[in-house]
Amino acid sequence: MQIHYNLDSFPIGTASVVTIGAFDGVHKGHKIILSRLIELSQLMKVQSVLVTFWPHPKTVLQSTTPIQLLNSLDEKILLLKQFSIDHLVVLNFNQTLAQLSAQEFTQSILKDIFHTRHMILGYDHRFGNNREGSIEYLKNNFKQFEIEPIEIPKQEVDSVTISSTQIRKALLEGDIQLASEILGYPYRLSGKVIRGKALGKTIGYPTANIKLDEPSKLLPKQGVYAVYVYVKQRRLKGMMNIGLQPTVEGKVVRIEVHIFDFSDHLYDEEIQVECVQYLREEIKFPNIAALIHQIQHDEQIIRSYFLEH
């Protein structure tokens, strides 16, 4: 899969079949669209092109409404690499792009750059300023652009929307198993290890404090998790706490990971954490001794979980 962050890098004169979307989560619902894209490109013997946007269009068009993403851009690209897509085009979504009319977008991008033969769209998908572009728009202007729209039926589009809603709901409720089932893979958090208060080290449980690469990434329910940690090309086991550290009067939500049987320094390292099991809610303990006792109990349960799975 070739990745293009600039339209100038797209190969000239390559006929293609195109689909457009945010594809946040790249979950099972999205795979219906991706399968259709690949099948049609192979049938037509043209290139398959997936056009996505970064930042997410809602951050530009609905700047007052917070958005919680299921993927950072790097995570999304990694997931899309699993498919046999020829070209992934990441368009910088800004006001200039948002203000392109459907006619300008279709002519200057879909036609002139991608040489689009077929375009796969959901029944309610819109593109261009004021949402002028649609399946009907392409049908009505076929003589001008010669782009044949392929409609994704309502039930399949609704399946994608419902899936995204269910994933977010499951994560916020700590239902990691359901979220993973709908996604088709375990939910991940990616970021850099930063310096914290070093409290964990003083109580025998040093932790990696993670600053997320994508600030808009959805954090699952606060509490304790069994996790796999990917660091320095290794997959390790551990436990994670997401929360305020109420026992020590914390004021900011932190992501802290204790990696089992691991002692290397990780400051400034990029790591990925895979959520595999939600254990319990965050609790305020009367003292540090009670906190340590609970952490030891959590460790026993999580180590047993990994042995059983």
Image (spheres, rainbow, N blue to C red):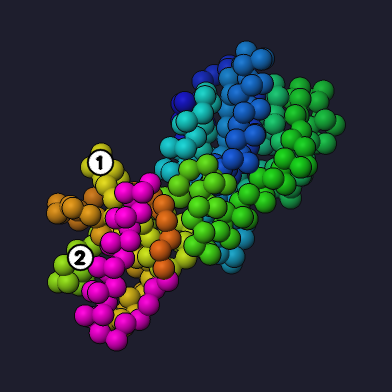
Q: Is residue 206 visible?
A: yes
Residue 91: which numbered mark, if any?
none
Where does residue 11 sit, x and y in percent of width and height? 51, 20
> Which residue is the extreme one toward the top?
45
The span shown in magenta is 281-309
Say above or below: 85 vs 303: above
For badge 1, the amino acid type reads: Arg
Number of marks in the rendered image: 2
User: Left or right: 208 with respect to 3?
Assistant: left
How many other residues sit within 10 Å of disc 2, few (<14), some (14-19) or many (≥20)? some
Residue in view at x 29 percent, y 68 percent? 297
Helix, strand, or loop for circle 2? loop
Residue to which mark 2 is pinned: 205
Which badge, 1 or 2, is on the more N-terminal residue?
2
For badge 2, the amino acid type reads: Tyr
Q: Quick check: is 161 in the magenta stretch?
A: no
Residue 234: which numbered mark, if any?
1
Residue 238, located in which quarter of the rendered image? bottom left
